[in-house]
Amino acid sequence: TQITNQFKSYLLYIIPHNTNVLLEDTMSTKYDIVPSDSAVTGVPMVRIEAPATLSPGFRFDALYDGQAFSVTVPPEGVTKGQMIAVPFTPTMKVVEAEPINNRSENILGHWKDGLCDCCKFGCFHPHLWNAWCFPVVLMGQVLTRMKMNWLGDAALEETEWRSTFRKTLYVAIGYFVLRTAFYVPPATVQFVNGHYEEVFPDVPIWKIIIHKVLILTFAIYVLTVLTKLRRAARAKYSIPEERCLGCEDLCCSLWCTPCTAAQLARQTADYEVQHAQCCTSTGFEPDPSVSAV
């Protein structure tokens, strides 16, 4: 387990150019001891900096140029900081949706920052504006990073989580369009017969019912999905509940919706390295090596 956690982030270097490339967290869930593979003639080689001392035969997944490939620790083992050359043989396509974490910090077991640290990256950071103005948009971006669907469940296929942001955006747009169509003006206070009283607008009862049902349905959707998302993030990063044991995720999502969405966005990204965007599917600048969703 300790070796698994230490390999949560790592660097790739192209041997001819020795260029640093930030990797996304694409760790395999299995760490079996397997025979070491020999380099294949004609296959491109990349170098990996070992973040810890590891025994021979341990295998993990690395990411280079948007593609995942398997890496096996050589027979002689590796020590922390050692550069090892391995063949680059892609096994599957990986997109920018995987959570990106700061390779220099261990965030397992705790939040990277507090619930109210929304201005950590400045008052004009895209994730902050999304959190306060369009929290559903930010929620959809974090769902995509976590490879979850628009209902807050783990996606079974790549096509499912690739469409998560688009679907959450459709939900938000649909809600605002319908709420505008069935808008009910609020009651006003007027001076009538020598005293003040509330005067309700002359609106059909069916329109009032639809208006209230829309608000309630949308609120339940956001609360449910955000609660699931926060619970999934805590599980991924092994973060225990600190307050309101048993219902912390629900309480944060209910009473601090913008702050909760913003904290999840910071937890699943390294904004000191990755430039943020307001309207992309993951909240990052589009990766030119990955086709658009």
Image: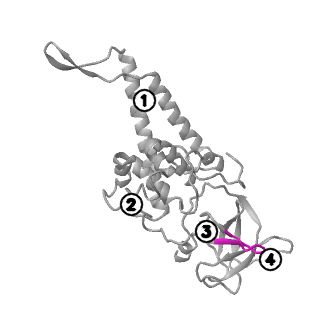
Residue bearing mark 1: 214
- Residue 47 in the image: state x and y as whole percent: 72, 75
Identify the element where label 2 is drawn: loop
The quadrant where residue 169 appears = top right
Report if the CB atoms under discs 2 and 4 are less than 8 Å apart.
no
- Residue 199 in the image: state x and y as whole percent: 25, 18
- Residue 178 in the image: state x and y as whole percent: 48, 26
Task: Report the span colored magenta.
Answer: 11-20
- Residue 267 in the image: state x and y as whole percent: 48, 59
Q: Give the alpha-carbon distance from disc 2 to disc 1, as whole Å.
A: 32 Å
Q: Earlier in the sequence, mark 2 or mark 4?
A: 4
Query: Marks 2 and 1: which is nearer the front?
Result: 2
Q: What amino acid type is highlighted by mark number 1?
A: Leu
Q: Earlier in the sequence, mark 2 or mark 1?
A: 2
Mark 4 surroundings within 10 Å by alpha-carbon count, few (fewer than 14), some (14 through 19), many (20 or more): few
Residue bearing mark 4: 39
Identify the element where label 4 is drawn: loop
